[in-house]
Amino acid sequence: MIIPAADATIGDTFVQCAEAFGANAFLAVPANAARNYHPAGREWSYAVAAKAVRALWQCYADAGYGVGHRVALLLANRPEHLLHKLAMNALGICCVPLNGDHRPREMAYVLEHAKVDLVVVADDMQALLQAALDASGHRPATARFESFDRDLPRASAPAPSTTPAPDTPASVLYTSGTTGRPKGCVLSHRYELEAGRWYASVGGLARFEDGSDRLYNPLPLFHVNASIFSFYCVMLRGNCQVQTDRFSPTRWWSEVHESRATVVHYLGVVVPMLLLQPPSPLDRGHRVRFAIGAGVDPQRHEEFEARFGFPLIEIWGMTEMVRAMFDNLAPRQVGTRVFGRALPGLQVRLVDDQDQDVPDGVPGEMLIRHSAAAPRQDFFSGYLDDPAATEAAWRGGWFHTGDIVTRDAEGRLRFVDRRKNIIRRSGENIAAAEVEAVLQAHPWVEQAAVLAVPDEVREEEVLACVVLKPDARADAAAAVQALFDHCHAELSYYKAPGWVWITDHIPTTSTQKIQKHQIFEPGIDPRTLPGMVDLRALKRRDAPAAR
């Protein structure tokens, strides 16, 4: 295993890994005839990847890009995303991954907020980018991925340096916030390398070997999980990341089998979907030793392990701090939502609403830090252009995660709930305020409140409670469809309401602040109420956005 030095940067560390592990497999994409890139599959060794990275590195350098520039990548889950990122980071360029599931308005916000200098875009995503640019006042340069070496425009202002430092931003990743607008998490070279080293060294039931493990990751490269957490873990040990286009329950086991995966990543939604698949010889016809993920339904945790023959190791992490905690030591707490313990370099407090410590067994918000001497070491650098939000999250010298957790007498931490106004659907964080803002923009809506309801497959689903304006109340069914179409056109498909409830009244305070906890009686499942409309079947990624 390569241990990055204290002054290491991503480019230097990749060169070191490529020299040490040249013949080993580095990146792989499984075959998929329906995919419009590498349909037959492809694999890169460290040596081959290093050659490609150096060529990209030279292109960026010749065009004047370096420290201080931000380059956005709109390449879906192509493994070349990671090669571009390595080349960019070697010069001090900051990578801004774009979410191909975004609607134009959402993408326009990211382009504007990050002030990107350049977008590298695949041909099949050109139309989305153009629509986002049309909706934006920001005008970055663009380069076609397919002809990058010929189409890369020169930087409008050449970089003053192409020598990054450990604290140079390597990525800006956007994460949902309670204000409804995503916040840009600035991640440094030091952060990203330390996240990989931490994961690669965790041991126990999540022990990695050098040069022989193949990690299958179905998660998107605009998330921290695939692009940083697993990627630098495999790189530092000379292992291979198997990057599929997206999770598919019908392709999962064939891809895991054919790619010879020894480790897999999952989200809670993966577990019930795989359990619903018919029994197959591939259920045990694999090489997987363990899986890493979060959000497994406690009722299905043991069932999954018994059927498929490997442990689901629950973890906790977030974009702001992805040096995760792991329930990786025997005996594990299967089916309890336990995700590990505090560790040296990752201290934990559980507090009440006044930031006062709560005793063991009592739920409290989890606060974390590296140590008293260096609380923010190896955490994110801050929220882009938002020092107030950064300092608010760090009040009192501890990072406030927004997650409600309990701790037992042995120090085991168990996830309970989310304090933030966030809906967690199939691994995606959805800000309720963002959906509310879109609903309020519809001319038929007088008042709207969005909250989470349980979902047997996707963990949580979006429920919109809506008060219609008087002239729209005559045809509630037409209004529900119109509101769904409006949200589906303006938001990523997974953010649109899966349930809509038309009501005459949403409780508020004297200052007109909505009281979500008073909308439904305690103990009532809102999904069973009269007038509740189930729209989940309409929430398909491939469904065209109505206009």
Image: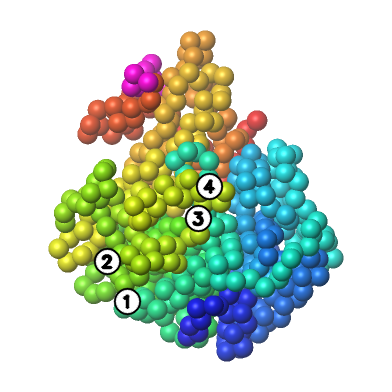
Q: Earlier in the sequence, mark 2 or mark 4?
A: 2
Q: Earlier in the sequence, mark 4 or mark 1?
A: 1
| Image disc number at residue 382 | 3
Task: Determine whether 6 is above or below 320 in the image.
Answer: below
Q: Amino acid at mark 3?
A: Gly
Q: Nearer the viewer, residue 423 or 371?
A: 371
Magenta segment boundaries in residue numbering: 502-511
Residue hosting label 2 = 341
Q: Amino acid at mark 4?
A: Asp
Marks 3 and 2, how far apart at CA: 25 Å
Contact, mark 3 vs mark 4 (Cβ under 8 Å): yes
Q: Amino acid at mark 1?
A: Leu
Marks 4 and 1, how far apart at CA: 39 Å
Q: Amino acid at mark 2?
A: Arg
Residue hosting label 1 = 205
Residue depicted at x 68% and y 65%: 67
Mark 4 nearby-residue class (10 Å; few <14, some 14–19, many ≥20): few
